[in-house]
Image (cartoon, rainbow, N blue to C red):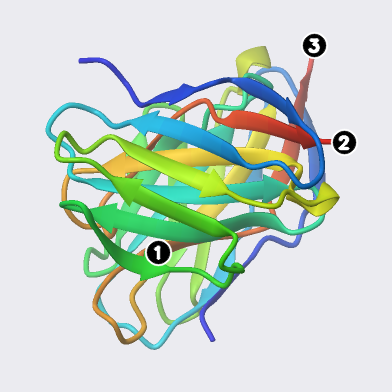
Amino acid sequence: AQTVTQSQPEMSVQEAETVTLSCTYDTSENNYYLFWYKQPPSRQMILVIRQEAYKQQNATENRFSVNFQKAAKSFSLKISDSQLGDTAMYFCAFPSAPSSGTYKYIFGTGTRLKVLA
Amino acid sequence: KAGVTQTPRYLIKTRGQQVTLSCSPISGHRSVSWYQQTPGQGLQFLFEYFSETQRNKGNFPGRFSGRQFSNSRSEMNVSTLELGDSALYLCASSFEQLNTEAFFGQGTRLTVV
């Protein structure tokens, strides 16, 4: 079964510091995407960053970057220079198409990040 | 470009009733998928529609159904509501396949009393 695991239910970080959120996944697929989504109290899921598995280079979006280790099936998110607005739930997500060829997102359980002033 | 719009934002229903939620995807997107989010079960896939056809379905009872119209707008219906159906229902749209990024609406918070 394809799974996504986030082992850190809650984390906190001081403003301007760096924090890393962990995610591991399990799949037998070879080409796939991985995503980090942010869900602030407004509830809307916002795409933070995506990684294409065939690309060895880690994705970067401004203060957000990933450490993608394909062999280890690990996909961690690093937030640099943390800001109060980064306070949110963060979900790791993996679009899975095990046999049907049609996809559905599998989400981790989320990490609640609090940025402290 | 307008984002994904879900209506209504909040609903309170009584056990046994039925409810219909609506989702308007981003213009040009043909795939609409639905997710249920609860504190206990997290985010779970309900179903996905593409060009008015259900393309994929999660493990939910038949009380949960949906449809998609020719303009790609989608509705989901839950009949014979149970207390356990209380959740945030999220809709996501993507251009064609869900293997690229999906864009989410703000959700509909359903409370069953």
Q: Chain of mark 1?
A: A
**Amino acid type of the residue tagged 3 in the rendering:** Ala
- Disc 1/disc 3 C-alpha distance (Å): 37 Å
Q: Which residue is mark 1?
A: A104
Vertical placement of residue B92 versus B42, above or below: above
**Residue A79 visible in the shown view:** no
- Disc 1/disc 2 C-alpha distance (Å): 30 Å
Q: Chain of mark 3?
A: A
- Residue furthest to the right in view is B113
- Give the x, y percent position of residue A46: 46, 31
- Any mark on residue A117, and which? 3
Looking at the rendered image, the disc whose residue lies closer to the viewer, 2 or 3, is: 2
Vertical placement of residue A65 versus A45, above or below: below
Looking at the rendered image, the disc whose residue lies closer to the viewer, 1 or 2, is: 2
- Give the x, y percent position of residue A6: 68, 60
Which of these two is toward me, A25 or B96?
Answer: B96
- Any mark on residue B89, and which? none
Looking at the rendered image, the disc whose residue lies closer to the viewer, 1 or 3, is: 1
Which of these two is toward me, A68 or B103?
Answer: B103
Looking at the rendered structure, whether the residues under marks 2 and 3 are on a common chain is answered as no
Q: Which residue is mark 2?
A: B113
The N terminus of chain A lies in quadrant: bottom right
Identified at 59% across, 67% down, the residue is B60
Q: Secondary structure at mark 3?
A: loop
Identified at 75% across, 39% down, the residue is A112
Which of these two is toward me, B46 or B95?
Answer: B46
Identified at 20% across, 52% down, the residue is B52
- Give the x, y percent position of residue A84: 68, 14
Q: Secondary structure at mark 2?
A: loop
For label 1, count other residues whose C-alpha is less than 10 Å away and answer few (under 14), some (14-19) or many (20+). many
**Amino acid type of the residue tagged 2 in the rendering:** Val
